[in-house]
Amino acid sequence: MEAFVMNKDELLFELCKTLVADKEVVGQDAWSKVVIGGSVEGGSASLAGFCFDMQGEWEAAAPRNRQALVLLRQLREAMADMSADHKQWKACLVVIGANGKFAADFDYDDASRWAIGPATHAQRLAEFAAQPVPGGA
């Protein structure tokens, strides 16, 4: 019996579903968008961001479901397998709207591109807040 292998679009969709199902990512009822930065470098993977409501108020968002990290790694591998040079991205930005639409961006050079830490918290919060809701509000 052959195992089912998801393509990059299916993996991104599953990652988004896993993120919004996690109460540590979407913990508020009236949310507008979730913006999550992810990175994979060496043996480490991480996901962290913010969940915004319609007024722009935010809560920190970091998935507890380890499946999100599994899907993040699988997405990276699937995308590299499909590219001519097999280059792997180091960081990604996923924006998920409460309308069910999502978008993603990838950085192939800088694993810390969308990382959130004490020195980058205010910058990332402003940058993530400015991300439009995919497909409009």
Image (cartoon, grey):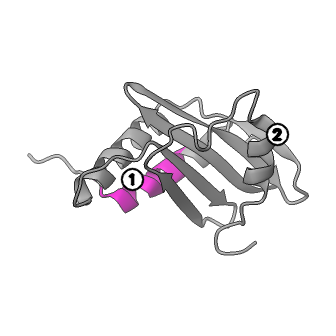
Q: Which residue is mark 2?
A: 122
Q: Residues within 10 Å of mark 2 (few under 14, many from 20)?
A: few
Three-letter code for the amino acid on which mark 1 is drawn: Leu
Picture layout, residue 40 above or below residue 58 = above
Q: Residue furthest left?
A: 1
**Which quadrant holds residue 50?**
top right
* Quarter of the rendering occupied by the C terminus: bottom right
Secondary element at tag 2: helix
* Residue 65 point in image, percent of width and height: 53, 32
Q: Nearer the viewer, residue 88 or 37?
A: 88
Magenta region, mostly helix, strand or loop?
helix
* Residue 61 point in image, percent of width and height: 70, 38
How far is the residue under mark 2 from the one under mark 1?
30 Å
* Residue 97 point in image, percent of width and height: 67, 62
Q: Nearer the viewer, residue 114 or 137?
A: 114
Q: Nearer the viewer, residue 3 or 92?
A: 92
Q: Which residue is mark 1?
A: 11
